[in-house]
Image: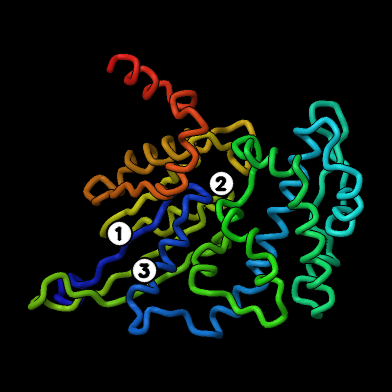
């Protein structure tokens, strides 16, 4: 093998959707920049995505209120919610429920004129002040909502300001599902006097719909970095609402480890979102979702 090929390492970033692979890739990118910053142009690209993240989370919260509370959100907020969202009827368990989805007008409004953004800010804050909304948020394991929602919601006014430019932290916390393969390449010297190595990090989509494409990336892999979210032990899968996220990650990891093409490949398990796990575990018993942990705890 030529020296140039020997100094080139291809690392595959795998894991279920929402595990935080893309955030890790952004952090790696940032670490290997001289100024440790995203450019203003890069940050402005994320502006509308962050606004959409926040509104989509509010949409999921309103939906959860309608499903988990007998009365749903109170009447004063219902009118405001109807301006933000389009309510569609869906059949669930033989009963018809109205589920909010972001309207096309609202999607355009996210990138719209300042007066539209001001109205959005007021609407979001009014819904957020509702007691039932905050009460339902404590039951977040029962519905899907972005991890960074708690970070973004107190900053609604800043995010919907006409001159808003996302900070570095905003960009890192932004949720943007990977729909296509993303390649990050940088140089690294493993030893102070050693040769320069080329590292290629390949991020592939973690959602179920994208996993069929993984096989096309399995050749010439130096290592697999499998990312699993610790904080999702009590969450349900976005694509399949009766499926536990931790169970999905465990079975996916076992499947990757058993692949013949990775028999001689280093596989690293990265347990992500430790901070969110610490916040949650005091209020949600980990043992309820892990029979093995419950049994071990009883023996100890």
Q: Nearer the viewer, mark 1 or mark 3?
A: 3
For marks 2 and 3 on the same chain, the one whose residue lies earlier in the sequence: 3
Quarter-wise, where is residue 278 in the image? top left
Q: Nearer the viewer, residue 73 or 1?
A: 73
Residue at left 54%, top 85%? 40
Q: CA distance from mark 2 to mark 1?
A: 22 Å
Tell me the element at label 3: helix
- View extreme (top): residue: 299
Q: Which residue is mark 2?
A: 208
| First reached walking from the N terminus: tag 2 or tag 1 | 2
Question: Disc 1 on helix, strand or loop?
Answer: loop
- Closest to the camera, between mark 2 and mark 3, is 3
Name the residue beneath numbered marker 3. 28
Which residue is depicted at the point 43% across and 35% down? Answer: 251
Q: Is residue 52 left or right of residue 280?
A: right
Please, what secondary structure does the residue beneath circle 2 have? helix
* Disc on res. 274: none
What is the CA distance from the residue labelled 1 to the residue labelled 3? Answer: 19 Å
Q: Which residue lies under the disc numbered 1?
A: 221
Q: Quadrant of the N terminus?
A: bottom left
Asked if labels 3 and 1 touch by Cβ distance under 8 angstroms, the answer is no
Which of the two residues, 208 or 41, is positioned nearer the viewer here?
A: 41
Residue 8: image location, x then y, percent: 24, 71
Instruction: Find residue 178 and report its horizontal and vertical position in percent.
Output: 54, 61
Q: Position of residue 76 (x, y in %)?
A: 90, 49
Left or right position of 65 against 241 = right
Residue 261 higher or lower than 168, as above or below: above
């Amino acid at each position: 093998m030529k020296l140039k090929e020997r100094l080139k390492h291809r690392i595959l970033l795998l894991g279920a959707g929402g595990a935080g692979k893309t955030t890790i890739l952004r952090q790696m990118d940032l670490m290997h920049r001289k100024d440790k910053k995203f450019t203003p142009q890069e940050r402005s690209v994320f502006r509308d995505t962050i606004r959409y993240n926040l509104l989509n989370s509010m949409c999921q919260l309103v939906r959860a209120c309608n499903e988990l509370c007998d009365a749903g959100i109170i009447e004063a907020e219902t009118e405001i919610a109807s301006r933000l969202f389009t309510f569609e009827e869906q059949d669930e368990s033989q009963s018809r429920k109205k589920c909010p989805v972001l309207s096309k007008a609202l999607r355009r409004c996210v990138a719209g004129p300042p007066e539209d953004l001001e109205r959005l800010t007021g609407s979001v804050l009014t819904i957020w002040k509702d007691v039932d909304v905050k009460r339902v948020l404590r039951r977040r394991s029962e519905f899907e909502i972005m991890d960074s929602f708690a970070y973004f919601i107190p900053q609604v006014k800043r995010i919907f300001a006409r001159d808003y430019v996302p900070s570095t932290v905003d960009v890192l916390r932004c949720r943007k599902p990977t729909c296509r393969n993303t390649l990050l390449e940088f140089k690294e010297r493993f030893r102070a006097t050693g040769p320069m190595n080329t590292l290629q990090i390949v991020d592939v989509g973690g959602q179920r719909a994208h996993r069929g494409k993984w096989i096309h990336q399995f050749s010439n892999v130096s290592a697999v970095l499998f990312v699993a979210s610790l904080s999702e032990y009590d969450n349900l899968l976005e694509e399949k609402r009766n499926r536990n996220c931790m169970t999905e990650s465990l079975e996916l990891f076992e499947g990757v480890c058993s692949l013949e093409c990775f028999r001689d490949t280093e596989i690293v398990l990265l347990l992500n979102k430790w901070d969110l796990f610490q916040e949650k575990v005091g209020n949600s018993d980990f043992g309820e979702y892990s029979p093995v942990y419950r049994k071990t705890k009883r023996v100890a």
